[in-house]
Amino acid sequence: MKPEALLFPTPAGLYCPVGDFYVDPVRPVDRALITHGHSDHARSGHGRVLATRQTLDIMALRYGVDFAGSEQAIDFGETIHLNGVEIGFHPAGHVLGSAQIAIEHAGVRIVVSGDYKRRPDATCTAFVPVPCDVFITEATFGLPVFHHPDPALEIGKLLASLEQFPQRSHLIGAYALGKAQRVISLIRQGGYDKPIYIHGALAKLCDYYSSQGIELGELRPATIENGGASQFEGAVVIGPPSAFNDRWARRFNDPLAIFASGWMMVRQRAKQRGVELPLVISDHCDWPELIETIGELKPGAIWVTHGREEALVRWCELNGIAAKPLHLVGYEDEGD
Ligand SMILES: [Zn+2]
């Protein structure tokens, strides 16, 4: 069987006709396999959803318990069959519960990596390379210019700023699923043990991460009711990026605007957002990690999606690896 017949792009997303399922569909479908809980990959309204327990829990937290007609959990390394197609989920190292999905039939194995990274991350299970004939890779940071620094060094900048400006509230913008908890975890690893204040939009997911054994330390709600603005002097406050444009952000005295994202490597993006202290912390592969992963897996072909498809396709071709862009639409990662 040709890989192109086992899995191909449709307007609803990647479709496997033999198994009759979609991977991370962008429209409601009868059967969906979901790589991870970010809203561009995990949508509500499907008939049946197959995902890791943690991804299903995260979908229920975000969309309500009736997010799908029915759900089925699969463990890492477990194998199930759908109409004769063998399915396996393997850690992707992107956010809690994130998985690569291996799809195998008639001697062909395709791995859909979803979003993934190779850097150590205490908040989720590390990426596992899965041998395959076709590796579908994201290319969010798929340009040679993207080299992400060590996140511990980035957190060091935050800790230095807290010492230098002990009166100012340090307001960190971080996406609600994955980035916020990873930033908190990194701050704890950096030795900071005071309470960290969080916006209400982060509470449910932070509670869930804690319930799964991820150490976040003491978190307090960043509400003004009990104590006034002075309680946030010199404090670390984390909120979703959207909260920085509304009244919530204006309650803090002399706030220092910080944003944690892989995109903070691009000075212009930091400037546009009025970010005083950009922290380059990414939950995606940078260019060297993409190249390293392809070199390690040595698949028969690479299919590229989400982001800078052409540059990575060109690199593969120059290095003798068959590659093509998938041109999937509807994926704007919420957790870069
Ligand atoms: Zn994602």
Image (tube, helix red, strand yellow):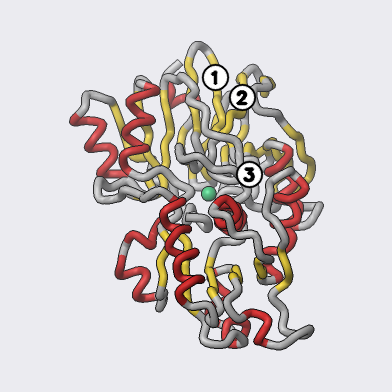
In the rendered structure, the answer to whether residue 120 lies left or right of residue 87 reads left
Task: Tell me how far mark 3 sits from mark 1, CA to CA.
Answer: 25 Å
Image coordinates for residue 115, horizontal then vertical, percent: 49, 43
Quarter of the rendering containing residue 202: bottom right
What amino acid type should be assigned to the residue bearing mark 3? Leu
In the rendered structure, the answer to whether residue 282 lies left or right of residue 58 reads left
Query: Looking at the image, is mark 3 or mark 2 nearer the viewer?
Result: 3
Q: Which residue is mark 3?
A: 96
| Label 3 residue SS | loop
Image coordinates for residue 271, horizontal then vertical, percent: 34, 75
Quarter of the rendering containing residue 87: top right
Q: Which residue is mark 1?
A: 104
What amino acid type should be assigned to the residue bearing mark 1? Glu
Residue 3 vs 67, above or below: the answer is: above
Task: Tell me how far mark 1 sits from mark 2, CA to CA.
Answer: 9 Å
| Sooner in the amino-acid sequence: mark 1 or mark 2 | 2
Residue 64 vs 150, above or below: the answer is: below
Q: Quadrant of the N terminus?
A: top left
User: Of the numbered discs in the image, which one, if any, rests on residue 88?
Assistant: 2
